[in-house]
Amino acid sequence: MADRTSDSSILLARPRHAWRLSPPWLGILVAVGLVAVVAAALAPINGDYYHVWIHNDPQTNEELYEEVMIDMFMAHTSGFLWGQIIALILGAFLAAKVRGMPRALASAVCAGLLLAAVDFAVAWQSSAGIRQQIAWWNENHPGFLPADPLSVDGFHHVLAVGLASFPLAAIAGVGLGNLITPLLRIPAVVVAVLTVLAAVPYGAFAAVLGWFAAAADGEPVALFVPLALLPPAAVTPSAVRTAIGDHCDAFTNTMLISGVAWALLLLIAGRLARHRRSRSER
């Protein structure tokens, strides 16, 4: 009886709005909605990426080709940067909610795959204007452009690696969640504010870094280091550089390798932190 009473008092002492009291499906539903909104909102912006951020007056056939290809790649990968950040946060939420790391990992992988599917579906639907532009070019200039994005091998690579990064980010989030478990016991509104304060500057930095990689002339090899340290930041330059052929798939491979490394490192660190806490509680 004493143990039951103490357990009840601990449950009552927890904050009523803590993440731990929120069901997993609610967090997944919120993440899916955010990913869909972000992908839909960014598709028109990314569809004009070349004109706004790289060259506002393309003249030669080479520049016109680059404009269409870059805009095509960017529009159809809309939301990949923020979607992976959302997947990371969702993984931390699942680590706090789902009992046991194996179950949390399984939930995170499934949720990450769901976010990837939703992001791609919304981005594809929102990028119909780009495909219409390609159709017009092919009708008036046969052979100048590929028939559609799915006929381009480089696009397959960017798409495959980008979508695979969603479950990788969610797995990394599980490790991160186990590292910051004490923080996740505070009210959810505080966690949300702290998350926004951390994610927005990161997203802004990633956007600036992506612009430098996209607009730089020559061989911006030095950018591989920060791209490797911040894997979601590689989304924009991966799409752009693969679209125009520079470095082939090097930026995309950097994103994938870095994502796997970060997921493993955070999982190991999270497991060690969890083991240490369980030993101290004995």
Image (tube, rainbow, N blue to C red):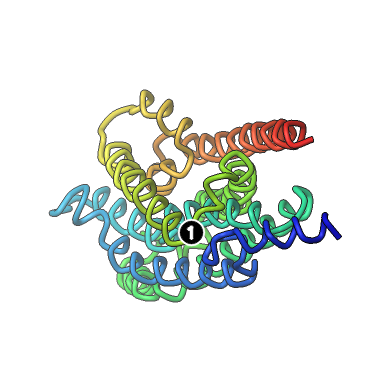
Residue annotated with mark 1: 187
Q: Estimate how packed mark 1 is, as few (under 14), some (14 to 19) or many (20 or more) residues with alpha carbons within 10 Å.
A: some
Q: Horizontal and vertical percent for residue 30?
A: 51, 70
Q: Residue at x 31, y 54 (%)?
A: 65
Is 61 on the left or on the right of 143, as rendered?
left
Q: Which residue is at the far right?
A: 1
Return the residue nearer the eye: 115 or 89: 89
Q: Quadrant of the N terminus?
A: bottom right
Q: Amino acid at mark 1?
A: Pro
Q: Is residue 24 left or right of residue 219?
A: right
Side of 193 relative to 173 (left or right):
left
What residue is shown at x 66% (from left), y 33% (from top)? 273
151 or 211, which lies in front? 211
Q: Between residue 256 and residue 105, name the one nearer to us.
A: 105
Q: Tally the numbered discs.
A: 1
Q: Position of residue 232 (x, y in %)?
A: 46, 44
